[in-house]
């Protein structure tokens, strides 16, 4: 499998801010294998994995980033 080494990764706290949830929710999603992480310590989550999770909850969420494919970091952080 090919991995983009330049794809941004986010901490649990940053991911929680992006999704608008508590850090405990992110830990639960990781534990339940709903969000895949890149590293065990410290935990890092690739932007692509956040997008995949968003699409499972809101299938039309891709409209949010479809017009701006070059933006690599969400504006919320």
Image (cartoon, rainbow, N blue to C red):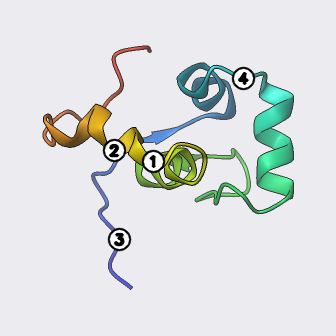
* Dot 2 or dot 4, earlier in sequence: 4
Q: Nearer the viewer, mark 2 or mark 3?
A: 2
Name the element at disc 2.
helix
Residue 21, which numbered label?
4
Q: CA distance from mark 2 to mark 1?
A: 8 Å
Q: Residues within 10 Å of mark 1 (few under 14, many from 20)?
A: some
Name the element at disc 1.
helix
In the picture, the quarter occupied by the C terminus is top left
Toward which corner of the image does residue 66 lie, by quadrant? top left
In the picture, the quarter occupied by the N terminus is bottom left
List x then y, in percent, for residue 50: 52, 46
28 lies above or below 37: above
List x then y, in percent, for residue 59: 47, 50
Mark 2 and 1 residues: CB-CB less than 8 Å, in contact? yes
Mark 2 and 4 residues: CB-CB less than 8 Å, in contact? no
Mark 2 and 3 residues: CB-CB less than 8 Å, in contact? no
Q: Which residue is mark 2?
A: 62
Q: Residues within 10 Å of mark 2 (few under 14, many from 20)?
A: few
Q: CA distance from mark 2 to mark 3?
A: 21 Å
């Amino acid at each position: 499998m090919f991995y983009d080494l330049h794809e941004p990764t986010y901490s649990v706290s940053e991911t929680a801010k992006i999704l608008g949830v508590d850090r405990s929710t992110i830990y639960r999603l990781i534990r339940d294998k709903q969000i895949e992480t890149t590293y065990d310590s410290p935990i890092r989550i690739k932007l692509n994995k956040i997008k995949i999770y968003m699409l499972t909850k809101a299938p039309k969420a891709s409209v949010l980033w479809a017009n701006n494919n070059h933006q690599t970091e969400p504006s919320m952080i």
